[in-house]
Amino acid sequence: MYRLIYEQLKKWKKDKNKKPLVFQGARQVGKTYLITQFGKKEYQDFIYLNFEQDEELSDLFAGNLQVENILKKISLYIGKKIKPDNTLLFFDEIQAAPRVLTSLKYFQEAASEYHIIAAGSLLGVSVAKQGSFPVGKVNFMYMYPMNFMEYLLANGQNLLVEELTTRQEISNFPEPIHNKLIEYYKEYLFVGGMPEAVKAYVQKKDVREVRKIQNELLAAYRRDFSKYADAKQAVKTLELWQSIPFQLARENKKFKYSDVRKNARAAVYEQTIEWLKGAGLINVAYNISAAKLPLSGYTDYSKFKIYFSDTGLLGAMLNLSSKTIIEPDAVFKQYNGAFIENYVAQELVCADWSLYYWTSKSDAEVDFILEKENKLYPMEVKSGTSLNLKSLQSYALKYNPDLLFRVSPRNFITRAKFINIPLYALTPVLNNWSKSRLKIRNN
């Protein structure tokens, strides 16, 4: 299955100033598969070392970390010399061998001609723990679950993706096309973007198989909690993790520590949230008290929402019925729109937008605030077709933004400064808008 990040890997390879690449992402988002395909297709030689699968491989990095010494050991192990220009060295699951991570600094300083990618399921956690991690000595790239455009591509809908991504004018889709995209979107909310689940659904159309895969992934994550944390921290991580779906299911989705454990305080669970962020399992949106720049100066880090990194896994945690795919509006109404808001957060993060939301003293709330070219834009998420714009109007009266965005199941709508973006078109519209190649026509 094609992943859009493949093009970024090709750019990294061609970059004359490239550094060893640290490739991050949650377990089972497809990192190993993608880099293996990239190595075999784009290079003459591909060398793969998995430090979790074979713990003895860490001995290749024992002793001094001189690059010549490391390369000699690897060459002896694989039985051939390593040619720098036409070989990709892939160090996988390096959270199991911290010295491999450290060695990247020396590769950059003494042997920058070598092409090296390092990856790991919990690499974000490992990097966070290493206070001496060499800043500026590596490139970073992050891989997320498949977004909706990638899901369409996996389903062979290349023409739809081309139309969505190349559109430079906002105007209605014909209803048959709009409805077709909504049906694919509803499937995506259930299946999610974990490659194994997507592949199973595309090939078999079996929702039971999809849910089985999702539950197995959730079990693997729970095992990781105990594998990479001490016993007390593992318990706290599991408690907080299990509370997230039910916090999202509330009408007010602001995260509450007391919903994890009675009388719980931030100090007990702050480290847990950072661990889950580092593992790539959650996305966090922070509250801003005023829509002013710089956003960091108006951010209240004690108020936030936590979203799952994948809507399919959220559905598995909440045991969402597969019937919601068939029923006309069921998936949009489930759990106070939790899946829709989680989906939008997921797409925004995948497209490199930071997550912020705004609340007013009069109880108005705008789900996301976007920053572009030193201006702020409100975005409200609606799970239904209601035209209620109360929160957007409240924001507009206070800050008078150039544009107001709403994301909903409705077709494209533009009126003066207001734009309704269909849920399925969120990423391509924002991409074209951020690159200033989008025309807006009222309809």
Image (cartoon, rainbow, N blue to C red):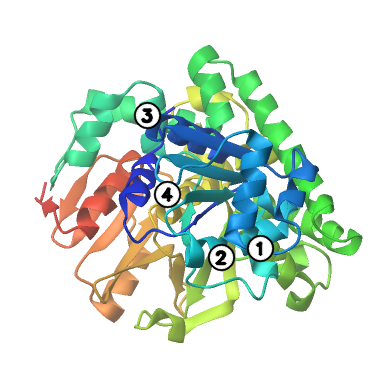
Q: Position of residue 436 (x, y in %)?
A: 16, 59
**Residue 120 visible in the snapshot:** no
Labels 4 and 2 touching (C-beta < 8 A): no
SS at circle 2: helix
From this viewpoint, which residue is outermost toward the bottom? 297
Residue at point 90%, 59% (across, down): 231
SS at circle 4: helix
Labels 1 and 4 touching (C-beta < 8 A): no
From the image, tell me which residue sits under label 2.
106
Q: Is residue 156 left or right of residue 205?
A: left
From the image, tell me which residue sits under label 1.
65
Q: Is residue 143 left or right of residue 229?
A: left
Q: Is residue 223 left or right of residue 174?
A: right
Q: Earlier in the sequence, mark 1 or mark 4?
A: 1
From the image, tell me which residue sits under label 4.
347
Relative depth, front residue between 312 and 104: 104
Real-space CA distance between mark 1 and mark 4, rounded to the nearest whole angstrom: 40 Å
SS at circle 3: helix
From the image, tell me which residue sits under label 3.
152
Q: Position of residue 197 (x, y in %)?
A: 58, 28
Residue at point 67%, 47% (across, down): 73
Q: Which amino acid is tagged 1? A: Leu
Q: Which amino acid is tagged 3? A: Leu
Residue at point 59%, 74% (across, down): 303
Real-space CA distance between mark 1 and mark 2, rounded to the nearest whole angstrom: 7 Å
Labels 3 and 1 touching (C-beta < 8 A): no
